Amino acid sequence: MYPAPAFEARICPPDQLRERIASLPRPLVFTNGCFDILHRGHVTYLAQARALGAAMVVALNSDASVRRQGKGDDRPINTLQDRLAVMAALGCVDLVTWFDEDTPIAPILACQPDVLVKGGDWPVDRIVGATETLARGGSVHSIPFEHQRSTTALLDKIRRL
């Protein structure tokens, strides 16, 4: 029998989030998304986000939350448990959790991040939690895409093949 991979310890149920972030160094970076099929655009963005602080929490949309976003009837391709494991295995991620609501405001309020980050398709004034983060003296960033990739485009390409 082999031991569980060490990265699994980075997966945090939402009800344990406040307790678990207490041990993370500050400044704390927070980001969120579906991250259904991880690609170069995702990992570049995540590494750039992590560089803005000493630790990073990533919150993933639950499967039901992804379905409500209208990305397609077959989305997500990967289940929440699979997406959590892949995200937790990334070296730039210190903790990964999830949310079932349509927005990540609950985990943002639980984390009280110093730095809130989204990808370049999100203007700062539309980032959920920006008002609260800025009011606490934190910063909010919309990181421009360095590699134009998308899971939707990748799936379209696979389906054409």
Image: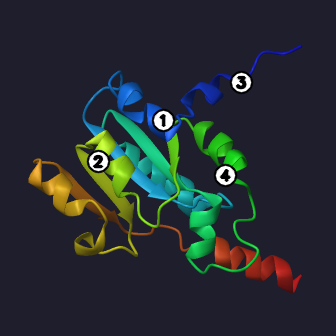
Q: Which residue is mark 4?
A: 80
- Say which quadrant the C terminus sits in: bottom right
- Say which quadrant the N terminus sits in: top right
Residue 49 horizontal/vertical position (percent): 38, 50
- Identity of the residue drawn at 53% across and 68% down: 147
Spatial separation of the CA atoms under disc 2 and disc 4: 22 Å
Mark 2 or mark 4: whose residue is earlier in sequence: 4
Query: What amino acid does circle 2 point to?
Result: Leu
Secondary structure of residue under mark 3: loop
Mark 1 or mark 4: whose residue is earlier in sequence: 4
Q: Which residue is mark 3?
A: 5
* Side (left or right) of 51 relative to 44: left
Label 4 crowding class (10 Å Cα cut-off): few <14, some 14-19, many 20+?
many
Verify CB contact (< 8 Å) between mark 3 and mark 2. Answer: no
Query: What amino acid does circle 4 point to?
Result: Leu
Instruction: Tell which of 151 and 47 is nearer to you.
Output: 151
Label 3 crowding class (10 Å Cα cut-off): few <14, some 14-19, many 20+?
few
| Residue 17 vertical position relative to residue 77 in the rendered view, above or below | above
Spatial separation of the CA atoms under disc 1 and disc 4: 15 Å
Mark 2 or mark 1: whose residue is earlier in sequence: 1
Secondary structure of residue under mark 1: strand
* Side (left or right) of 15 relative to 40: left
Mark 4 or mark 3: whose residue is earlier in sequence: 3
Within the image, what quadrant is residue 103 found in? bottom left
